[in-house]
Amino acid sequence: MTTPDALRRLAALGRTPSDRALLGHALGELDARHQLASGIAAEPNLEAIMTEFVTRLSDAFGSLPAIRGMAVLDIACGSSSSRSPVTGRRTAEFEPWMCRLLVALGAHPVGLDIGEITDETFEHHRVDLGVSGALDYLATGSFDAIHESRLFGSPEFRSAHGSATERVRREIHRQERRLLRPGGVLIHSDGRRRPARTTGPRQPGEPGPSGAAAGS
Ligand SMILES: C[S@@+](CC[C@H](N)C(=O)[O-])C[C@H]1O[C@@H](n2cnc3c(N)ncnc32)[C@H](O)[C@@H]1O
């Protein structure tokens, strides 16, 4: 069977032969399990989202094989009920693709979302991020990396908590600093710059200075 063009383009984003091999394998798994190629054919913006996710991981870790075994928190990870800010309708674009990709790359993601998540192999919790203290139950320093993306513009968030956006943003950024272990990696957080270097001792196999790391 031939590889669909969209998956080939995504696999080509790998920056080294080992990145491209791992990515090609991971994308094949996403296609077999979650019909990634037909999702992109139906909703072409999904390719742009996957491109962004692969690029964020490459920028943050330097090499994709480095992600194996990492505990990664994905805040507002997406769900099978998530809706488009453009159409207001359910969309495959905002299914939990980052967590799925992380699983396929050998990481251990934990996804948080208010939407429905079923039949997924990663750990996930239903959480309302607009509620004060919503992330207090997670242990301090318990994640090697954190990703948080596109919560605040979502129709679900705007309708329930739009007037509290700045309070929630500050609280989530505070929690991200608390939840990352020293030297952990901030993959992406809306409205936060990735720190330039680690604050904790680097462990063998940890990303070097090219990888983003947790800051204060
Ligand atoms: C636009 S999607 C983003 C998905 C993915 N992070 C991405 O970057 O493509 C926004 C997500 O935020 C979730 N969300 C909105 N309000 C939320 C809330 N109060 N608590 C938890 N999740 C929320 C939605 O269910 C949706 O899955």
Image (tube, rainbow, N blue to C red):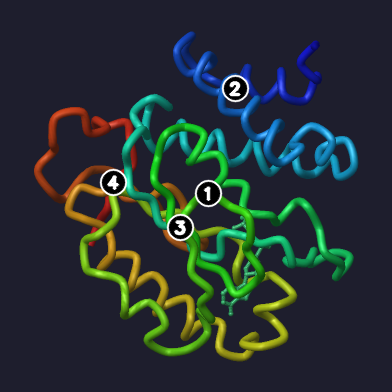
Image point (80%, 44%), residue name: 45
Cα distance between the residues tagged 3 and 1: 7 Å
Find out whether the residues at labels 1 and 2 contact each other: C-beta distance under 8 Å: no
Q: Which residue is mark 3?
A: 123
Residue 189 makes an appearance in the image: no
Q: Which residue is mark 2?
A: 13
Cα distance between the residues tagged 1 and 4: 27 Å
Cα distance between the residues tagged 1 and 2: 25 Å
Which residue type does callout 3 highlight?
Glu
Relative placement, left or right, of 93 versus 109 is: right
- Seen from the viewer's position, the closer of residues 52 and 77 is 77
Q: Quadrant of ligand 1?
A: bottom right
Residue 184 in the image, given as x and y percentages of width and height: 26, 49
Residue 121: which disc?
1
Image point (78%, 52%), residue name: 92
Find out whether the residues at labels 3 and 1 contact each other: C-beta distance under 8 Å: no
**Vertical relation: 121 (above or below) 173:** above
Q: Does dot 1 land on a helix, a strand or a loop?
A: loop
Residue 138 in the image, given as x and y percentages of width and height: 31, 71
Q: Quadrant of the N terminus?
A: top right
Residue 117 makes an appearance in the image: yes
Find out whether the residues at labels 2 and 3 contact each other: C-beta distance under 8 Å: no
Residue 213: which disc?
4
Which residue type does callout 4 highlight?
Ala
Q: Does dot 4 land on a helix, a strand or a loop?
A: loop
Q: Residues within 10 Å of mark 4 (few under 14, many from 20)?
A: many
Which mark is nearer the camera, 1 or 2? 1
Cα distance between the residues tagged 3 and 4: 23 Å
Q: Which of pointers 2 and 3 lies earlier in the amino acid sequence?
A: 2
Q: Which of pointers 3 and 4 lies earlier in the amino acid sequence?
A: 3
